Image (cartoon, rainbow, N blue to C red):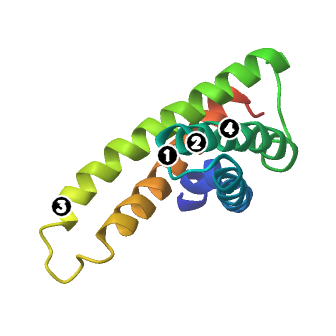
């Protein structure tokens, strides 16, 4: 019974590793762009984030499609791309919302003041990754 319930998550470790790798690469790209564009002012910082995040979504789509969701059926590549980008943007929104809620909660814990920002973001991102994995598995890539 437990195996049956966990079956939809069989590819989640691959999804997580691919996503984490792309995220780390995207952070590096943002850093380089920040240096090149001068992220000490708002325009350079915003532009570096938008370009890096967009590149991250494109690379994530390519690598998740290649390594995680290999048994696809029924979707045209164009629709797949639109659904993937929509899911990525939903994931970003959910991460922000979850992070803000956790941030407020963790701010009440006096022993965590130095780490509550990063901890709230990390927990929110992990929770959101489970949601986006399920959306991508069952909707975006309609895995067989």
Residue linked to disc 3:
105
Is label 1 or label 3 in front? 1
Residue sitting nearer the eye, 98 or 65: 98
Residue behind mark 2: 44
- The answer to the question of whether label 2 and label 3 lie on touching residues, with beta carbons closer than 8 A, is no
Q: Residues within 10 Å of mark 2 (few under 14, many from 20)?
A: some
Q: In what quadrant of the picture does the N terminus appear?
A: bottom right
Could you tell me which residue is drawn at 21 percent across and 67 percent down? 106
How far apart in space, not on screen, are marks 1 and 3 (Cα)? 31 Å
Task: Give the residue number, with chain letter if any, for mark 4.
Answer: 51
- Please tell me how crowded label 1 is: few (under 14), some (14-19), or many (20+) other residues with Cα within 10 Å: few
Q: Which residue is mark 1?
A: 41
Q: Position of residue 3 (x, y in %)?
A: 60, 60
SS category of the residue bearing label 2: helix
Q: Residue at x 29, y 78 (%)?
A: 114
Alpha carbons under labels 3 and 4: distance apart: 32 Å
């Amino acid at each position: 019974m437990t195996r049956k319930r966990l079956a939809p998550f069989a590819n989640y470790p691959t999804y997580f590793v691919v996503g984490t790798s792309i995220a780390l690469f995207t952070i590096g790209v943002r850093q380089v762009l920040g240096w090149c564009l001068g992220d000490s002012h708002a325009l350079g910082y915003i532009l570096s984030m938008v370009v890096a995040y967009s590149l991250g979504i494109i690379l994530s789509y390519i690598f998740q499609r290649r390594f995680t969701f290999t048994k696809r059926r029924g979707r045209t590549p164009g629709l797949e791309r639109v659904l993937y980008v929509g899911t990525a943007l939903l994931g970003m929104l959910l991460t922000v919302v979850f992070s803000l809620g956790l941030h407020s909660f963790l701010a009440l814990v006096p022993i965590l003041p130095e780490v509550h920002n990063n901890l709230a973001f990390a927990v929110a991102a992990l929770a959101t990754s489970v949601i986006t994995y399920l959306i991508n598995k069952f909707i975006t890539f309609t895995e067989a």
